[in-house]
Image (cartoon, grey):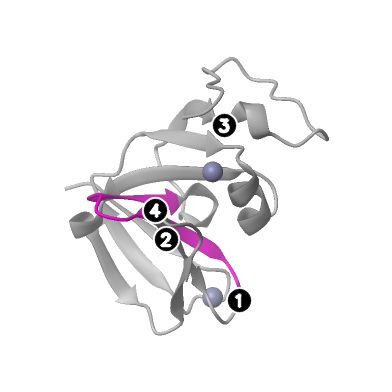
Amino acid sequence: MEKIKESCECGAVSFEISNPRKKITFCHCSQCRKSSGHYWAATNAKFEDVTFLSDDTLTWYTSSDWAKRGFCSTCGSSLLYRMNDVEGIGIAAGSLEDPTGLKPGKHIFVADKGDYYEIADDIPQIDKL
Ligand SMILES: [Zn+2]
Ligand SMILES: [Zn+2]
């Protein structure tokens, strides 16, 4: 089974993901931009396919009525995005350990993107989701 490892910047939170989605989604919504510092790049997996190796400092922030975001309370790394009552979980691409084998998939919420950058690649762009 194919596994990828993820860890936060300080290393206190780490986990392995089995069978992650092969394509990265880039989300340009204002919540993702604020919590990640730019736009959010994430793969996705079933929550049951995430095995935590260490998660003492993993903290969940309820970012909306429908989802929460997981981050490390020591170093602040944004790591996870989980919608309520959905089996999939979004996993930050920037915190994966190479080689990931993943490829860019699509941009979402491009109508909400920041005015300080252009999207210069040729993968699909979707206004909302
Ligand atoms: Zn950390
Ligand atoms: Zn977003």
User: The residue under label 2 is which amino acid type?
Assistant: Glu
Q: Position of residue 90 (x, y in %)?
A: 39, 49
Q: N-terminal of the two: label 3 or label 4?
A: 4
Which marked residue is nearer to the observer: mark 3 or mark 2?
A: 3
- For the residues bearing labels 1 and 3, Cβ distance under 8 angstroms: no
Which numbered dot is residue 75? 1
Q: Which residues are magenta?
A: 75-91
Quickly name the residue at label 2.
Answer: 6
Quickly name the residue at label 4.
Answer: 66
Give the residue displayed 41% in from the left and 52% down from the top: 91
Could you give the CA–CA distance between mark 3 and mark 4, rounded to whole angstroms?
16 Å
Quickly name the residue at label 3.
Answer: 109
Question: In the rendered structure, does residue 67 fall within the stretch colored magenta?
Answer: no
Question: Cβ of disc 1 within 8 Å of ligand 1?
Answer: yes
User: The residue under label 1 is which amino acid type?
Assistant: Cys
Could you give the CA–CA distance between mark 1 and mark 4, rounded to whole angstroms?
25 Å
Q: Secondary structure at mark 2?
A: strand
Q: N-terminal of the two: label 3 or label 2?
A: 2
- For the residues bearing labels 3 and 4, Cβ distance under 8 angstroms: no
Give the residue displayed 60% in from the left and 50% down from the top: 31
Question: Cβ of disc 3 within 8 Å of ligand 2?
Answer: yes
